[in-house]
Amino acid sequence: MKKICACMLALGIMLSGCGSDTSPSEKTKDLSEAKVGVIQLMQHDALDASYEGFEEVLLEAGIKKENIDYQVAGDQANCQTVADKLVNGNNDLIYAIATPALQSVASATNELPIIGCAITDYESTKLVKSNDAPGGNVTGASDLTPIEEQFHLMKQLLPDAKKVAIMYCGSEDNSIFQGNIAEQVAKDNGYEYKVYKVSDSNDIQVVTEKIVSDEMDVIYIPTDNLLATYMSSVEAVASPAKIPCIVGEEGMCKSGGFATYGINYKNLGKLAGQQAVAILKGEKTAADTPIAQLKAEDCTMVINLKVAKKCGLSTNKADYPKEANFIE
């Protein structure tokens, strides 16, 4: 299988129903007058960091903080209402954090430039034509995590693990995409694996208890908005059973995951911010702005020693890779 690294892999992306002029609504020469709308699906560390990095770049470029309309939808059901408000709010550009947010904004306008972030596979959203030339009013930054490297980390840290539970939200396109990759990577690495899907927060405890009763050795959770928000609920059941979680990103590790090797979402937000500034200046359009990717060196290994202790694993830093960062 071709090695998969989130920070290097270019994703194909495709636009549906957006055949209009893809130039910015108005070229903004003085960025102090530019207005930017932001829709974030929900609040958790990764999505919050995606906004922080984006805002930092915009403010440095001269955009006024009061001209950034930052809205958190709270859940998927509220995304369309927030998207419609931003599209009709005289904004020059909209920043959409997470796939449901992007899909909602894209359904509301095919004219305003839209920058996406914290989105794994743009192609599956069917909102762009290709990775190199999106071709419509949507572009952004991809957060596909280095799944193969995460499984290598699993093997390195948990050499006796044989049975892997692959857990994710079955209604999130990004999670499904990553879950399918994880299945193949688990198979390629000789693991016995089983997929466990949740549909909402009410499922999490029950599904985690099923993982425990099935006597799985380790849980793998990709970047997943639902489980990132409720990672502590997974940990509360898994850790007492001595089942550690290898997770998709640092925020999930802080909330109860044992270890990760993933991207920095604040840096990803900065890439999206750079795209936005170029479009607002009239230097680029969304149509000719390729999907941004972080480089391999932007990936970080993080190990939660608190969770390690609960799972009966070593808390001695010397037992872990030298490049690891620790949560204590």
Image (cartoon, rainbow, N blue to C red):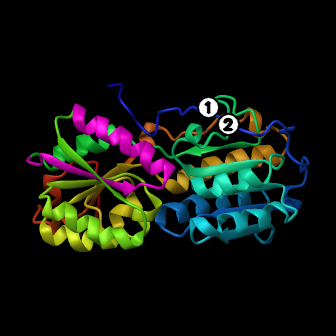
Between 291 and 166, the residue placed more toward the observer is 166
Quarter residue 60 falls in: bottom right
Residue plotted at (66% across, 34% down): 290
Residue at left 14%, top 66%?
311
Asked whether residue 101 appears in the rendered view, the answer is yes
Please rate how many residues cluster around mark 2, counting C-alpha atoms within 10 Å: few if below 14, some from 14 to 19, many from 20: many
**Image quadrant occupied by the C terminus:** bottom left
Q: Does 226 sit left or right of 59 as displayed? A: left
* Mark linked to residue 220: none
Quarter of the picture containing the N terminus is: top left
Residue 131 circle label: 1
* Nearest to viewer (mark 1 / mark 2): 2
For badge 2, the amino acid type reads Val
Q: How many marks?
A: 2
Q: Secondary structure at mark 1?
A: loop
What span is in magenta?
A: 160-188
**Residue of label 2:** 128
Measuring 76% from the left and 37% from the top, which residue is drawn there?
136
| Direction from residue 172 to residue 149 in the image, left or right | left
Q: Are marks 1 and 2 in contact (CB under 8 Å)?
A: yes
Quadrant assignment, res 20: top right
Q: Position of residue 5 (x, y in %)?
A: 40, 36
Q: Is residue 73 above or below residue 287?
A: below
Relative image position of residue 204 (x, y in whole percent):
33, 68
Query: Residue drawn 51% across and 45% down?
Result: 120
Amino acid at pointer 1: Asn
